[in-house]
Amino acid sequence: MSKRFRDVSIRQLRALAALQASGSITAAAGKLHLTQPAVTLQLRNLQALAGLPLIQRTGDGMLLTDAGREVLALIERIEAAMAACATSLEMMAGKTAGRISIGAVSTAKYFVPFAIAGFSRLHPKVEVRLTIGNRQEIGAALLGYGLDFAIMGRPPIDVEMDVRLIGDHPHVIIAPTGHRLARKPRMALSELAQETFLTREAGSGTRGLMERLFESATIRPTIGMEMSSNETIKQAVIAGLGIAFISAHTVATELDERRLVMLDVIGLPIVRQWFVVSRRDKVLLPPARAMQQFLGEQGAQFLPRTHRRLRLTRPSK
């Protein structure tokens, strides 16, 4: 068929289907609630676009040619696809189905899957796609409209954001259980100046918070290795390669199992917050809005519990 067939309209296809079902232009016009000349024009234009005769006049009425039956199969597939789309839209409007694309900084992976599971129990037909990355990566995806929303600590400041609080996010300094300062109470941060710190990579929110902490105390820590994974940092600390400033949520299990200890440093823990963040100009469909609301209202219950009550200290501006 002609390349012009890409310009075919749904009205033209429906005119052909009505003609096939009724056998005459007059009956097809009545079925479509159009005038007879309007249906004739739609069919004439459709045949011109197809470049082949689609209709044949016979003594028994108007019948479709082989080409016409091929086009009729097309309209049947289109109508089925449109019906399926309408059903999907209705389900989305009712928050019972649809897709959500969310991002989370890597530290959030210790609770976000549990939050998604909680939401999925309420909305089992909603498909959730989760992207994990560091703060820079998730921020870039959010700003580029690649995500419905993101779960992170410090919202981007480049554009206007809709920001909803999930809950507190404490940060602590961890050490292996046999560390010389493991049992020392209320030590000053300066006492750790000669310790070797294992850190996240540049661009990580945790790395940035650690740097601001030491800058505010005019201390330059000794940096051992940079690692892009909290899991690697934890194992390296357990192995005795150094100590680390890290999210308490990432080490809750290791602290409870006494594979790591949290050093009792004055001014720690430092607490950031977890937020659900979306571009204010991003259009969110009902399923995404439902999950956004769910995380804002119930997300805190999925945050990891630390092994003992923390004295919370807010970071300086």
Image (cartoon, rainbow, N blue to C red):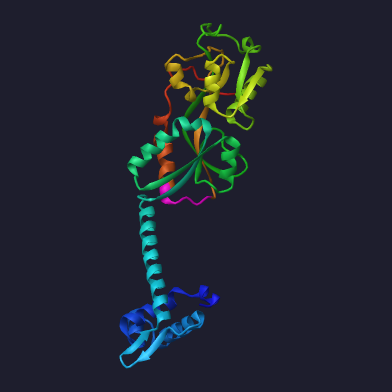
In the rendered image, which quarter is residue 28 located in? Answer: bottom left
Can you give x and y, in whole percent of width and height, for residue 279 in the image? 54, 46
Query: What x and y, as percent, mark residue 256?
Result: 42, 17
296 relative to 7 in the view: left or right: left
Classified by dominant secondary structure, the portion drawn in magenta counts as: loop
> Which quadrant of the structure image shows residue 307?
top left
Front-most of 3 and 209?
3
Range of residues picked out in magenta: 282-287
Across and down, in percent, residue 161 comes to: 55, 43
Q: Residue furthest front?
A: 66
Residue at 50% x, 52% y is 283
Report the residue at 41% width, 43% height from top.
Answer: 291
Q: Which quarter of the rendering shows the C terminus?
A: top right
Eyeballing the image, is 123 above or below 182? below
x and y, in percent, of residue 41 in the image: 45, 85
Left or right of residue 97: residue 45:
right
Comparing 87 with 234, the one in front is 234
Q: How many marks?
A: 0
